[in-house]
Amino acid sequence: MVRQAKAQRMLTHGQIWAALDRLAAHAGLSPSGLAKRAGLDPTTFNKSKRITADGRERWPSTESIAKALAAAGSSMDSFARLVDDDSGDSHSVPLLGLAQAGTSGAFDESGFPSGKGWTEFMLPAAEDSHSFALEISSDALAPVYREGDVILVSPGAPIRKGDRVVVKSKAGEVTIATLKRRTAKALELQSLDASAAERTTASSEVGWIARIVWASQ
């Protein structure tokens, strides 16, 4: 009986990786963002690194976990609680780098994630079923968003004047801006750089528009 009880308390591969995902989410980061902040290769905690090419489970090293905890300002006790967290309060959404968002096949015609290249981002609470996350790939949108920040985009959220939005043109260009005005014929967008001129885009050229509902700052 004692041996059986000990076996039931053994940590699983899935528990450890889920805890790292939760650690990143609580720090307001994607798994790759946490790895970068910890001074590790950005792909260290990616989904693709959790299984070897021959199908074996790959476990994170104690050194990488220690560095991740330090980067997130967390303790081993806190990490243990994340390992044991099976409350179901966390929720994952598809995650893609902003630089890849304009590539063909990343989204379907409705603006929902599609195709390859997506990983996952853990959130402390569930959002609508079509939400997805984009990781900012550079400092071009600073100081509003910086490299490594993650924005949560909700295609189903209502959009109002003054909302920050993601717009994808039918030609494939992805733009993050503030919505100034929306009519049947055009979108008027203000760059996140307040000194830049407003931009007007014909509605016929817009593939989809979705509201940014959260950012990891």
Image: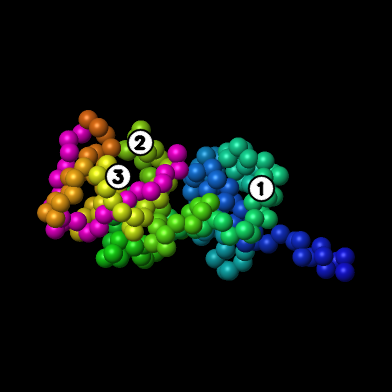
Residue of label 2: 144
How would you rate the neighbour count of disc 3 (Cα within 10 Å): few for under 14, some for 14-19, many for 20 or more? some
Q: Report whether 5 appears left or right of 38.
A: right
How would you rate the neighbour count of disc 1 (Cα within 10 Å): few for under 14, some for 14-19, many for 20 or more? some
**Is residue 207 shown in magenta?**
yes
Q: Which of these two is toward me, 183 or 30?
A: 183
Image quarter hosting the N terminus: bottom right
Q: Which residues are magenta?
A: 196-217
- Judge whether residue 31 can be spotted in this image: no
How far apart are the two marked residues, 1 and 3, measured between alpha carbons? 35 Å
Residue of label 3: 163
How would you rate the neighbour count of disc 2 (Cα within 10 Å): few for under 14, some for 14-19, many for 20 or more? few
Q: Report whether 39 appears left or right of 204.
A: right
Image quarter hosting the C terminus: top left
Report the amino acid beneath label 1.
Answer: Phe
Q: Where residue 99 sits: x, y (%)?
A: 33, 49
Q: Are marks 3 and 2 in contact (CB under 8 Å)?
A: no
Label drawn at residue 79: 1
Q: Report whether 88 appears left or right of 160.
A: right
Identify the main secondary structure in magenta.
strand
Foreground label between 3 and 2: 3
How far apart are the two marked residues, 1 and 2, measured between alpha carbons? 30 Å
What residue lies at 88% left-to-right and 65% top-to-bottom? 2
What residue lies at 42% left-to-right and 59% top-to-bottom? 128
> Dot 3: what SS?
loop
Earlier residue among tags 1 and 3: 1
What residue lies at 11% left-to-right and 54% top-to-bottom? 185
Which quarter of the figure has residue 216?
top left
Compared to 132, does 198 lie above or below? Answer: above
Compared to 198, does 119 lie above or below? Answer: below
